[in-house]
Structures are given as C-alpha cells and as structure tokens.
Amino acid sequence: MTLSENEWNLLFTPVIKLVKQICGLPRSYPTSAIYHRYILGINNPWDQICANQITAFLYLINSNSPASRSIMIRCRTAQLRLAIHDNIFEHESGSLFLGHQEAKSNLSLHNIIIARKLNIVIQQDYINRSTWTISGGNMPIREIFITHRCLNLLRKIGTANSYPLIYASQLMLPYGHIMSWACYRFIAGLSAKGRIAKWFQLLTRWIKGISAPEMSRYSLFNFLSNILQPVSEDKRKHPYVIIKDKNNEVSVGFVKKRTQIKKNEEKIECLIIEVCNIEICPDNSQKAIIQKQECPKMITITQHSALVLPIFNRLSTGAITHIDWYYIVESLNRNKNISANSDIQQQWEKTPTINLNGDNLDIN
C-alpha cells in the first residue's frame, strides 16, 4: 500500500513539532525554513521517497530482469483497470491523476503519477510505444465516466475476465442495440447470476444516445470467432451452433449427427446440421427463440466451421437464447446482401457504354 503526500506530512508532523521544541522555536515558525539546507537541512520524507522510488523505478524498467517484467505487468493491469486506451506512460496528466485510488494498491502506477506531478514524462521508443496502445474501438468508456463524474465506478468493472472493457463500442450491437448483461457476462467468462451491476446500468444508459459506427461483416465474424467456442469432439453433445454456408449466409442450426468424410486419404470430422429459424421471442423482447423448421434443411460442414451458440434452455421444438445473437445473425446476413448489391452496382457502373457520335465511337 502506498501513501500520499498529505499522509506522509501528517506522519512527520510530530517530528517537526519536536524539532521546533528542541530548538526553542514557536509553533508558528515556518516549516519550510526547517527544511532549508542552510538552516537545519532536515530532509522532507516525501521528497526523499519520491526521489528514491522514481530512480529505482526508472532503473528497473530499463533492465532486463524479472523485476522489470513484473513492473510492466502491473502497469498493464493499471491501464486495463483504469480503461486507458492510449499509452499509460504518456497519458494526459489530468486524467491520470484521477487514478490515485488505484495507485494506492499499485506501486508502479503510483510511481508514474508521482513522476508526472514532478513534470517527468516517461517516454518509450517507437516500437514499444505501439504495444501499449489499445486501438480498434470507438468512444473510450473512461471519458464517459469522467464526463458523468462517476470514475469511481470504473474500478468496479475489474479485469479478471476475458473481455476487458475499454471502448463503449464493445457493448454496441448491430441496429443500435446494446449488449445485454447476460451476454456480456457470458463473453467475459463470468456468471450472470444476481442483479445487474450499477456501473453496467449507467454505462448502457449513457451510450444509448451515442451513435457509433456499425461493425463490418468482417469484424462481426472475428467477434464471433473470438467469443464463441468450436464444437467439441464429444459425440454425446448436440449443441445449437452458428454456421456459415457455401453462399456465405449465416444461420443457426442444430447438430443432428456427426460423420467423417474421406478426402485425399485423410478423414475429416464433419457435422450434419439441421438449419433452424431464429426470431425475437413474442412474450419477451429480451430473448430470442430458435425454432426447428417443419421441412428441415440439412447441410454438412466441417466441425471447426461451427461455433457453439449459448442458450438459456431447450424446448421440444427449439431453444431460447440471448436476443443479442439474433441481432448479430440478422446483421451479418443484411451486410452480405448490402455488399452483394454494392458489388453488382459497381460492376454495372463499370460496364462501358458506346455512344454513336457521327463517325466516331465514344466509349464512356
């Protein structure tokens, strides 16, 4: 645990009183005069601690030792806990100073803040600087919490999960929808039991009025690949999955059977999928219902091409899942149609037309 400058001054106050008493000085005598090197020359403990800690900190981070790696881990942990999207060593001073509560339990962050207060800026080379920048999102949530003066809630999010929140766009789904609490907890690898956290309620309320660019089809595919698990090799399990057929159309299906296909004397594990429909649940708009078709369509795909879809509970005719997956599947198919129409339009525009202009042929 680290102490602030005021806490060190309070601890050192009895010593200052004793020095004034021994020297026969009144209590109103300026304390700064006691610290003056040509009067008594008493060392201020805070100044000594700052000098020693910053010197040791700079020496260790420039060394190739386990201590250096440990410091870097603490700095990255602080960056994630404070949701700082740019380099923490070069982060804006006013915003960095707001992390003093986190610095009480993180000595590396404490040293960075002290150095910045002394106008010491720690800079890295170009290669290392880029590794500390978290890019790819929109609207840093740290700025949102600072704007609403609720930065203390940022520490409630925590980093002990597989989906640390840095940008508000991480909670944005297609069609302007916000990710549900259950879906976020699933992606983060945490339990969704209990009440919805206060920070999540406030954050989703704040970002509802913010327009964020919709994720591209490629980004959505990467998003699904990173958060959903492939089908396991356990043949007893028949999960619901998200699949992409040969026409690049995304759909939801049910693993009906497992089989093997022999190709070039090599056996390939495949799945026979029964394609299902996914719709918004009529009695609960926060859930989606997966329904089996009356005339089921069967397709065969390789096992690694299917991603397991999380569901709430199974029904005799399907299953119930998060509404978030409905929006994602619909958006993927909509983006596919838009891109296909765009390609057709571009080809149409590139088709040359020949105009007869007297004896000359003009090609546009």
Image: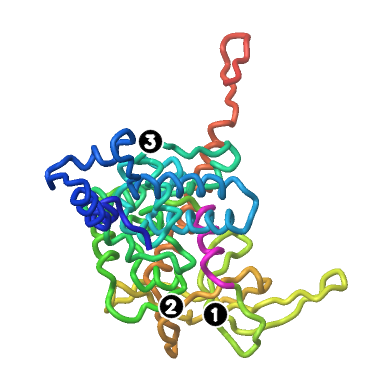
Provide residue 143's location: percent of width, then percent of height: 31, 48
Q: Given contact means CB atoms under 8 Å apart, are the residues at marks 3 and 2 in contact?
A: no
Disc 3 from disc 2: Cα separation: 59 Å
Provide residue 349's location: percent of width, then percent of height: 53, 32
Return the residue found at the far right.
265
**Residue in the picture at 46% in, 44% down:** 89
* Residue bearing mark 2: 290
Residue 226 on the magenta segment: yes
Q: Which region of the structure is painted magenta?
A: 218-229
**Residue in the picture at 35% in, 56% down:** 175
* Residue bearing mark 1: 254
Find residue 305 and report its image quarter: bottom right
* Residue bearing mark 3: 119
Coloring applied to the structure: rainbow
Q: Nearer the viewer, residue 290 or 88?
A: 88
Disc 3 from disc 1: Cα separation: 61 Å
Q: Amino acid at mark 3?
A: Asn
